[in-house]
Image: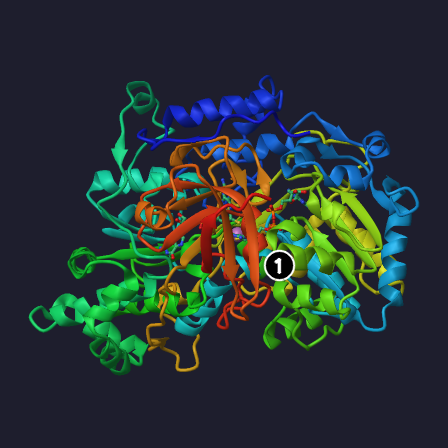
Amino acid sequence: MDEPAREPSQRDYHHPAAGWGAAVSVAKVLAHQHEIPNGPKIILKMNHEDGGFDCPGCAWPDDRKGLRMDICENGIKHSTWEMTPKRVGREFFAAHSVAELSGWSDFALEDAGRLTEPMVYDPATDHYVPISWADAFALVGRTLRGLDSPNRAAFYTSGRLGNEASFLYQWFVREYGTNNFPDCSNMCHEASGVALHASIGTNKGTVDLTDWESTEALILLGVNAASNAPRMLTYLAKAYRRGAMIVHVNPMIEAAATRTIVPHEIVDMALFQTTRTSTLNVQPRIGGDAALLRGVAKALLEAERTDPAAIDRLFLERHTQGFDEYRAACEATPWDEIVRQSGVPERQIRLVAKIYRRARAAIIGWCLGVTQQEHGVDTIREIMNVLLLRGNIGREGAGPCPIRGHSNVQGNRTCGIDHHPTEAFLDRLAAACHFTPPREPGLDVVGTLDAMHDGGVRVFVGMGGNFALATPDRAYAFEALRRCDLTVQVSTKLNRSHLVHGAQALILPCVSRTEKDYQATGVQAITVEDSMSMVHLSIGLKEPAASTLLSEPAIIAGMARASLPDSGTPWADLVGDYDLIRDYMAHTLDGFEDFNRQVRQPLGFRIRQPARERVFLTGSGRAEFSVAPLTDVIPADGRLMLSTVRSHDQFNTTIYSADDRYRGVKNLRTLLFMNRADMADRELAEFDRIDITSIARDGSRRTAYGYLAVAYDLPPGCAVGYMPELNVLCAIGDFSTQSRQPLMKHIAVEVTKATPR
Ligand SMILES: Nc1nc2c(c(=O)[nH]1)N[C@H]1C(S)=C(S)[C@@H](COP(=O)(O)OP(=O)(O)OC[C@H]3O[C@@H](n4cnc5c(=O)[nH]c(N)nc54)[C@H](O)[C@@H]3O)O[C@H]1N2
Ligand SMILES: Nc1nc2c(c(=O)[nH]1)N[C@H]1C(S)=C(S)[C@@H](COP(=O)(O)OP(=O)(O)OC[C@H]3O[C@@H](n4cnc5c(=O)[nH]c(N)nc54)[C@H](O)[C@@H]3O)O[C@H]1N2
Ligand SMILES: [Mo]
């Protein structure tokens, strides 16, 4: 079922980000999905201020100034991917056994089309066969009720789930009796939540788009914005034109760090007019950010000797705790260590510090390049330290800006998807929803995999996502899923997690965000929260892919009624009218008072953010400096540090093509970007076949065979390849001790010429 193999190639990309390259790429995807007649009409309603659906792609906020159309190339790809006319129904499953489908590529599985009806695995024939919704729910209920403890089940959430479904899901699961909520955040921005909470008493960023429009300096670490948050390009271009300084910190110089054609500006498109999107590109070694930031702080403190305005004394005295210790830590860290660990020359670090010092207001933004590291929490706390030094929080144009991933991953947490909920949240939930939630913390992603592996968890429910591929340690994850008594996947498209299943398995297909959600009181709207804490409505516009689909809230309620026969919760009423769910949310969630009215304002509403008002809900009531020592991030002799990233043509585990336009790659995913000198050391020529072996902390080794070496502008000692394929190399035990995030961007590897196999 694979597409015919085409010759792989790589050439440096010299065109601006977005612009015509993006337009051509969109046209190809639309053509592939046969959506040309219908797609554009629907797409124009995406992220619309008065109606329409929220883009199911990334979590970058919508333009708040009434721009009628705020869309990007990749948003169009994600939406049309859901809108495909292809269908996967009972005939499809009758024609293909699970063993046969297991031989298909991940691309081919999703490309088969939208799932249409509930299916159950039949071990006698190795085929999925149809099952009624009632019987499917009964199977879930029977199995969950049969477990000796509710903690024998785990309930995964992927970040597309809307707020109402998230709230209902955590209600069902907690009423059932467990806090086992592994979610994609555990692999994504867990470190940001932990660090921000310790530093400023909130687990979210504090800036919004108006701050982006007025800031004088933007420092962006570890994000590939042109591919993963393309709507940010417009803001980078606007900032550059205003004269703001933009510093990109990334071992790779990504497309967003060069220039762009602003997609909305038709004249720019027509004239190929480009705007620069970068003042300075800094290429640290993988994991070198903490040292770089320590250098920036050290330079600031040195500058203060002659320029008292280099730091904001008044802010430090009034609002922070621990400055003296931090200053001492900076003074005690020698420059040569900073330079060695960051991989950045002192002169360049001082230049970053100068840019930062000269800006009256600065934003520091970051994504996975920072979070998926052993010391991700320390690094984000160092980001906060640097911001605090100049009082860059709680005023216009300034503050921390974690760039979130999935379109509603931030909303999931807000609505209670949290394996470690606070007592205060559980108290309010108990009072508002009239049941007794469990108090014992639950399992996260790594904990769930371990528990499934050793028999502690017997039932896995996946609310979206692709747990089998997204999680670390492929072989271990597959075994964990296969050891379950029951796996339940609520999905829109066929994926690997349906084929790597428990003794019993269900596929429950759902209505997608682009589609109308019909319930007893009419078509329902859902809400989502973006990266900058704005909550707004999303209404699907297309007819559902099949009349047999149910919405996510309806599936959750169906499982709840079957599992909790004595529940006093009005499950059917809640599903009949999502306003009712929102009423319960208003009583439970901080900042959601009068939710139904607030969210119906034209642009929705912003969740209160105390740190934005310089109210710090930490133990001391002040923003807290941290004083972590620099850790050694340099790979041992003969080894490289590998970071796994997304290509331009994928959304997490969904692969649209084997191209990666901005990195100049065609028809190739099994590659390893390497520094030329590291290739020469290993006597490797361009496109030589290699084996990549990771060395885990416990000494265990895992190998990816037959990859191709590709020379790329990367610091020495660094290597980059694609997720999710390279999850074969992530060891289950290698997660951050600070955040429990798997180390997906910090994998020690050895690279050798491929041995013929
Ligand atoms: N089109 C599209 N959009 C997406 C997604 C998608 O798959 N496709 N995924 C969504 C999700 S869930 C998320 S979380 C986000 C992810 O958005 P990103 O964080 O941009 O995702 P990655 O592709 O993993 O890229 C990480 C970047 O970090 C850099 N990097 C690697 N190691 C280091 C390091 O040690 N230091 C620094 N400073 N940089 C480093 C890499 O070179 C790369 O540019 O995007 C979201 N948006
Ligand atoms: N090595 C490595 N691994 C990583 C990462 C990395 O950088 N490196 N990144 C990690 C990160 S940041 C994340 S967020 C995770 C992502 O992990 P997941 O969220 O688990 O994975 P996705 O690929 O986003 O899930 C895609 C599937 O979701 C289903 N789906 C799509 N839309 C809907 C919907 O509306 N409703 C429902 N119910 N299902 C839907 C489809 O069936 C599709 O196959 O991966 C993590 N894994
Ligand atoms: Mo993510």
Q: Quadrant of the C terminus?
A: top right
Residue 410 relative to residue 172: left or right: left
Q: Which x, y percent locates residue 40?
A: 54, 23
Q: Which residue is mark 1?
A: 183
Q: Can residue 685 be spotted in the picture?
A: yes
Q: Which x, y percent locates residue 451?
A: 71, 68
Q: Is 680 situated above or below 22? A: below
Q: Is 495 situated above or below 335? A: above
What is the quadrant of residue 618 in the picture? bottom left
What is the quadrant of residue 459 in the picture? bottom right
- Kindly give the residue lying farthest to the front in the view shown: 756
Instruction: Say which of 724 and 531 sits in front.
Output: 724
- Kindly give the residue lying farthest to the left in the view shown: 306
Residue 227 relative to residue 626: left or right: right
Q: Quadrant of the N terminus?
A: top right
Per the image, label 1 sits on a secondary structure element best described as loop
Q: Amino acid at mark 1?
A: Asp
Q: Which x, y percent locates residue 323?
A: 27, 79
Q: Is 531 situated above or below 569? A: above
- Within-10-Å neighbours for mark 1: few <14, some 14–19, many 20+: many
Q: Can residue 593 be spotted in the picture?
A: no
Q: Which x, y percent locates residue 546?
A: 77, 31
Instruction: Say which of 473 and 77 sits in front.
Output: 473
Counting the numbered discs, the total is: 1
Q: Is 148 situated above or below 714? A: below
Residue 278 relative to residue 726: left or right: left
Colour pattern of the rendering: rainbow
Q: Residue at x 85, y 68 (%)?
A: 147
Q: Residue at x 79, y 67 (%)?
A: 176
